[in-house]
């Protein structure tokens, strides 16, 4: 049993989860275009602007696994709605921030809301739709949320030009209210009825300490705090991450059951995710700033520059998901990242005085083709490699991996590219650093594509070979939905769907 993708309720569920998770994705990109205005208004340095982005990514990446586990145990709709309310209130605090320090603090709290709503949104789709409808539903979710992230710079540019950078946070208030009211009416409650034991809170605490320490070391190594201090804090962060793995390995009910990585397909999909999303994080951080500072674009012009990406994702993402369903995800997860890398190499040729049509547009077209080829297959591959009852966990892991990659990219890339201090306001210095950064991100994206070719399978099994009642072995395309799991003894059945225990 389950909900049909083409039903009225199915369309509402997709729309609600897309808008809910979309405000988080939108915020992740819309803030980028506001960085020059924020820096000027609040007197922030490059490291301060890095923390504006990474304060959000830090708690999002560290707590998103806990958010997924809470959704599986306490109710996916409940966690989704709590996350949306939390995110909306934190957005109001961001809009009213009088200093960069207060803004960073509000962004940290905003990340907590994102950690609750993001895994719950995708887990709701995985748990409520019929098995045969999960792939198109996930494809629609991936495409539409990806588009929401792509239009972020355009929306942000308009709001910054027309009102203020603070308006990019206020826009979340009416969206959040609509999502919560619609969710109560149309989304059924689901949970993992087999989950038992106490929740793991030590794991998330160690993850926060570990990621914060590593991020501090990367950002502040050249930020005046001192190399010795940065190294010491970084060492604490690394120790906390090591302790996190050990704790999760030994606890009876860990936040992250490490045996989920026994699936080669799941592990490979997340390694590819880390490489590709690390590259994307670096581009989204620097590109719109570069367009404004070095090429002289206004905020709305810089935002409009990404419109070809949006158009290509809208036109091709669903087709990409359908193609991956037919032939398997390996080809697209190889070609897509390589196209993204090619776009970044084109960006290394951009310079002051270049026109949009001859300089920026070709890179945007190639970049959009690469994203359309990659986004839906990589999400569905990771989700399909885990059992349905762990849908919240699988979604949390994949989101945590992508956010952690972006976190480290934003922290490390300016250091590696030689961008520091007030360079974000210096056209020549930023141009040189941007070119170096694009070479680094191109290498990361290309590595992701190569890894996909050698590690991603077009057929996936959730653990051991699966057996039908007749006894024959069967395999499932990685993006075609969650496979069956084998049962011991005479009884062999499909993995049970989490029952809808509450109305909309």
Image: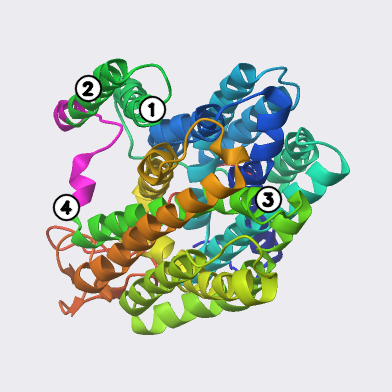
Q: Nearer the viewer, mark 3 or mark 4?
A: 3
Residue 17 visible within the image:
yes
- Gap in angstroms between the C-alphas marked 4 and 2: 29 Å
Q: Residue 492 magenta-drawn?
A: no
Which circle's residue, 3 or 4, is located before the other in the chain? 4
Residue at image point 68% right, 70% down: 356
Specify the color scheme.
rainbow
Residue toward you, 76 or 28: 28
Q: Is mark 4 on a helix, strand or loop?
A: helix
Q: Name the residue under label 3.
A: 292
Q: Mark 4 points at which residue?
A: 262
Q: Mark 1 points at which residue?
A: 222
- Gap in angstroms between the C-alphas marked 3 and 2: 36 Å
Q: Mark 2 points at which residue?
A: 235
Q: Which of marks 4 and 2 is in front?
A: 2
Q: Where is residue 434 in the image (x, y as percent from the top left)?
A: 49, 52
Q: Is mark 3 on a helix, strand or loop?
A: helix
- Gap in angstroms between the C-alphas marked 3 and 1: 24 Å
Count residues near mark 1 (Cα–Cα under 10 Å), then give few for <14, some for 14-19, many for 20+.
some
Q: What stretch is highlighted in magenta?
A: 246-261
Which circle's residue, 3 or 1, is located before the other in the chain? 1
Residue toward you, 288 or 192: 288
Residue toward you, 40 or 6: 40
Which circle's residue, 4 or 1, is located before the other in the chain? 1
């Amino acid at each position: 049993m389950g909900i049909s993708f083409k039903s009225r309720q199915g369309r509402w569920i997709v729309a609600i989860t897309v808008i809910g998770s979309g405000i988080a994705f939108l915020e992740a990109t819309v803030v980028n275009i506001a960085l020059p205005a924020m820096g000027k208004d609040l007197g922030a340095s490059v490291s301060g602007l890095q923390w504006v982005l990474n304060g959000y990514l830090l708690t999002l990446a560290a707590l998103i696994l806990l958010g997924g586990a809470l959704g599986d145990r306490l109710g996916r709709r409940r966690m989704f709605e709590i996350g949306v309310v939390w995110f909306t209130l934190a957005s109001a605090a961001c809009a009213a921030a009088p200093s960069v320090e207060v803004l960073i603090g509000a962004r940290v709290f905003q990340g907590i809301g994102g950690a609750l709503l993001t895994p719950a949104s995708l887990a709701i789709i995985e748990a409520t739709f019929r098995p045969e409808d999960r792939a198109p539903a996930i494809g629609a979710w991936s495409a539409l949320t990806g588009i929401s992230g792509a239009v972020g710079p355009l929306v942000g540019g308009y709001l910054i030009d027309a009102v203020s950078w603070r308006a990019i946070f206020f826009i979340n208030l009416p969206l959040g209210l609509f999502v919560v009211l619609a969710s109560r009416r149309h989304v059924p409650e689901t949970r993992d009825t087999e989950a038992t034991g106490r929740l793991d809170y030590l794991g998330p605490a160690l993850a926060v300490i570990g990621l914060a320490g590593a991020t501090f070391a990367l950002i502040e190594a050249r930020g005046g705090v001192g190399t010795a201090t940065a190294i010491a804090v970084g060492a604490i962060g690394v120790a906390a991450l090591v302790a996190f793995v050990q704790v999760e390995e030994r606890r009876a009910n860990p936040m992250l059951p490490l045996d989920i990585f026994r699936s080669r397909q799941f592990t490979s999909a997340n390694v590819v995710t880390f490489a590709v999303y690390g590259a994307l994080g670096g581009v989204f951080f620097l590109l719109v700033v570069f367009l404004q500072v070095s090429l002289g674009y206004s905020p709305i012009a810089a935002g409009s520059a990404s419109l070809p990406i949006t158009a290509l994702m809208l036109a091709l993402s669903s087709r990409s998901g359908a193609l991956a369903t037919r032939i398997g995800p390996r080809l697209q997860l190889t070609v897509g990242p390589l196209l993204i890398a090619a776009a970044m190499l084109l960006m290394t040729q951009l310079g002051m005085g270049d026109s949009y049509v001859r300089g920026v547009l070709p890179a945007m077209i190639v970049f959009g083709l690469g994203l359309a080829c990659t986004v839906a297959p990589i999400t569905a591959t990771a989700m399909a490699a885990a059992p349905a009852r762990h849908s919240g966990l699988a979604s949390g892991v994949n989101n945590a991996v992508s956010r952690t990659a972006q976190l480290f990219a934003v922290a490390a890339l300016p250091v590696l590219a030689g961008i520091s201090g007030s360079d974000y306001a210096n056209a020549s210095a930023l141009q040189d650093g941007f070119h170096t950064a694009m070479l680094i991100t191109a290498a990361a994206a290309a590595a992701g594509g190569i890894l996909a070719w050698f590690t991603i399978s077009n057929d996936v099994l959730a653990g051991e070979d699966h057996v039908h009642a007749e006894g024959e072995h069967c395999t499932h395309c990685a993006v075609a939905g969650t496979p069956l799991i084998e049962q011991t003894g005479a009884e062999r059945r499909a993995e049970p769907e989490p029952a809808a225990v509450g109305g909309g």
